Structures are given as C-alpha cells and as structure tokens.
Amino acid sequence: MKLGPLDPGEFAALHLIAVRIGRLSEARIAAARLVIQEGKTYKYAAELHHVTAQAVWNTVARMNALLSAYREAKTLEAAEAGTRPKRGQPRPRTAQKKTGAP
Amino acid sequence: MSKKSTKPAGANIFAGAIEGLGDSVSAFFTDDEAQQFPVALDLIDMRPQIRTELEDEDNPLPELAASIKAVGVISPIFLRRKGERYELIAGERRVRAAQMAGLDAIPAMVRDLTDQQAEDIQAAENIQRKNLTNMELARRLQKDLEQLGSIDAVMAKRNKSRSWVSKILSLNKLPEQTQRLVTEGVTADLAIISDVRQIEARDPFVAKELVDDLKRNFGKGDSREKVQRVRARIKPAANKAKAARHDLGELYAQARTGDAKAIAAALTPEQKKACEELREYFEQGCNAAKAGRAVFEGFDSRVFGTAGAGALRLAAFLRGVDAGQSGRFQLAEILRLVQSA
C-alpha cells in the first residue's frame, strides 16, 4: 500500500499509537520510519537498527494500515470542519452510533 | 420519486437520453416562445459544461448511440440561438450519441436566452442529475447490501469507507420534506440534506417552509448557512452528548497549548462531567486484549479521531493500554499524551 509521504506530525501521532497497540520496539519503528518517510530499503533500515528485514517489513505494513485509518479520520474531520463553524466543536454525526467498544 | 417512475413501460432504453432533465430545465422551454425542430448536428456548438463525466454506468454512450440508431432521439435537446448557429444548453450525451450513431440532425427545443439564463439552466440540470445519481447510487448500494449481506462487503466491493457507504445509504430513508430537496432538484449538497433531515425530525412544518424557501430562492445567498441557522434555532440548546463533546473539544484545545497539570486541576464542572467519558475509554484501554483492533474500530466508527473529543478519547484509551489492568485514571497524563502528538 503506497500512502505518500508522512509529515512529522503524522509520524509523531502514529508513533504514539503504534508503540502501544503494536507493542513495537523503538528500533522497529525507527527502521520503519526510514522506509516510509525516507524511502530507504528494508535491508538498509534493518541493518542500521539491528533488527531483521522481516520485522521491518511487518512494522511498515502495520504502520501503513494505521496511517491509512488515521488519514481517513483526518479527512472526514476536515470535511466536517468545512461545513461547521468551529474546529474542535461537536458536529452532528448521522452515521455514528456509540457502542460499548471503541 | 425520480422522473424514471413516470416513464412509460418500454421507454427504458432512453433512460440516458431523458435522464438529467430537471423540472427547472424543462420549465424554461415549455412556453410559447420555445420552438421545436430538427437541428443539424454540425450547427450545434457545445457550451463549456460543468459536467465532466459523460459516461453513465447504467447507460453507456455506445448503448445510447445504438438505441438512437434504432429508434431515433425521443426527447429533444435544448439549444439557444447564437447568430446563424446554435449553442447547446442541455443534452450533451444525446448530441454525442447522435454523432456516434451517424445522425445528421437531432430534435431540439430552441429559445433565446441570456448568458445568465443559460448558466442557470445548466446549473439546475447538473443539480438534478447529481441528485438522481446519488439516489440511484443509494438504491444500488441497498441492492448490494441485500445481495452481499454486510456493510463490510459493500465497502470492499465499492472500495469506499464506512462513512461514505452509510451517508449514501441514508438517502434511501429520507423523510418527505428532505426527499423534496432531491426530487425537486433543489440541492445535491449532502450537508444540507443531512441538516434538513434533522430539522424535519424535530418539526416537519418548519422543514416544509425551509424547503419551499430554498426552492424559491435557488441560487440566492448561502443555502448552507440558512439551513444551519434554522437548525440551530430548532435544536434544543444542548443535549447531554453534544455538551460532553463540546466540553471535551474545549479541553483538547486547551491541552494542545497549556500545562497539563494546571488544566487538569482547574476543570469546570462541565468538563469534569465530560471527563467521565474519558475514564470509560481509559478503562477499556486498561483491559483491552486486542488494543490494535480497538483503535482501528474506533477510527472507523469515528469515536476516535485526530483532533478534538475523538483525539482525547483515543489518548485516554492509549493511556489505559500503557497503564495496564492495575492502572489509575489520571487526566493530566492523558492531556500530556495529547500534547506529545
């Protein structure tokens, strides 16, 4: 999945989430960042951070999936903000139904 | 609901030829001044169109051309005179299909129109078409849902988000006045449709007046703003959930710039109440067996977000994941997490 370049803000947010939900080590995330953000090869990133290329590949795949969900949420929020006067304020969500689980 | 339902049986092959002709378009041409006669195709100039897509999934151009070749063009196109030539106002697909079918001339209604009138007609036609397209799409998605059995399968088939699918599907269940926005070609704006639906749920009479007003004053002023004003007037000042989201939104804005500890210590009573919701997400995070899945589902259902109340909920959940089962809810920690993102 190709999602285009990651800006630093996105990376910070993703890092926060990924490190918790994926139980990913800092080394794996740093290696994945090199691949996603700087276009380095898996092999190069793996060697630099002393992890396996397979581990980098797995981490990149998870980060990409997360980035995709994150960007979708961001796009929808921006679209709603365009129709509502103030950012950060409640917006009607006709499709949303709060369930027990997040 | 749409013009299709009024067509005689057997007229379906002309669906593409007739489709897109809103009431407002025909109204300009159904008076004594309009003349109908065949016009040579090479005398017709195309006016720049708002519409960029000429293809129709249900009735592709080659099929329309084939039906025109077989039985001719049933519904006239709309033109205005430009010196010795004519300018196309509505019916570009029919013109292109007629060219494709090798016709020399096409039946047309001709009227003298100003530039402004011509633009208005094109705009009306586009709104009508967009509405019909959305309604048709909604019906198609409903069929998909019945066949495939789940929203997830429909999302996969259409390669669209849950939110998009639910927005379009909701068009199938529009109440009377809201449906008029679509069927009478008033607007194709989903934000307006959604707001009018909410107004109608509270007061159908006000909704009727609003839709009449929007229809009467088509193109004048900001319709979204008008609808939002009515919606704000008619909605109760604040319901619980709305107030909580509002308070969390404010708290998020404060947390982005202020000192987490100080903010947590100086909460308003409303914010304190709203923070109970965060405690709930924190606890879910503490006990989450599959935190990753919960985050994806949270983004998907839009309980979690990248800013505002959604971001705070997400931070509370993640803080819970950090803390584990014996974790203790501390708002300042959650606010710090928001600051660091």
Image: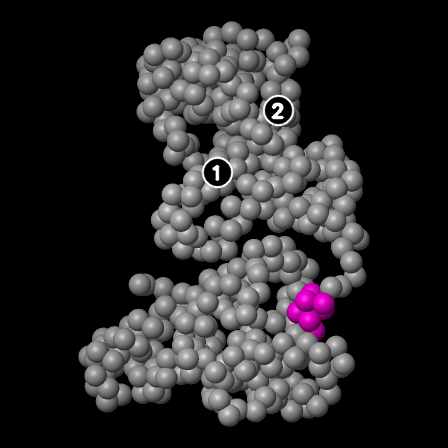
For residue B309, above or below residue B20: below
SS assignment at label 1? helix
The range drawn in magenta is: B240-247
- B251 and B198: which is toward the camera: B198
Left or right: A28 in relation to B289: left
Report the residue marked by disc 2: B23
Is label 1 on the same chain as label 2? yes
Q: Amino acid at mark 1?
A: Arg
Q: Looking at the picture, how far across and down is residue B290, in whole percent? A: 40, 77
For mark 1, what is the residue? B139
Determine the residue positioned at 71% across, 47% down: B201
Location of the N terminus of chain B (image quadrant): top right
Estimate the x, y position of residue A5 in percent, counting from the top left.
37, 68
Give the Cα separation between the discs numbered 1 and 2: 22 Å
Q: Quadrant of residue B334?
A: bottom right
Above/below status of B86 relative to B327: above
* Earlier residue among tags 1 and 2: 2
**Callout 2 amino acid:** Asp
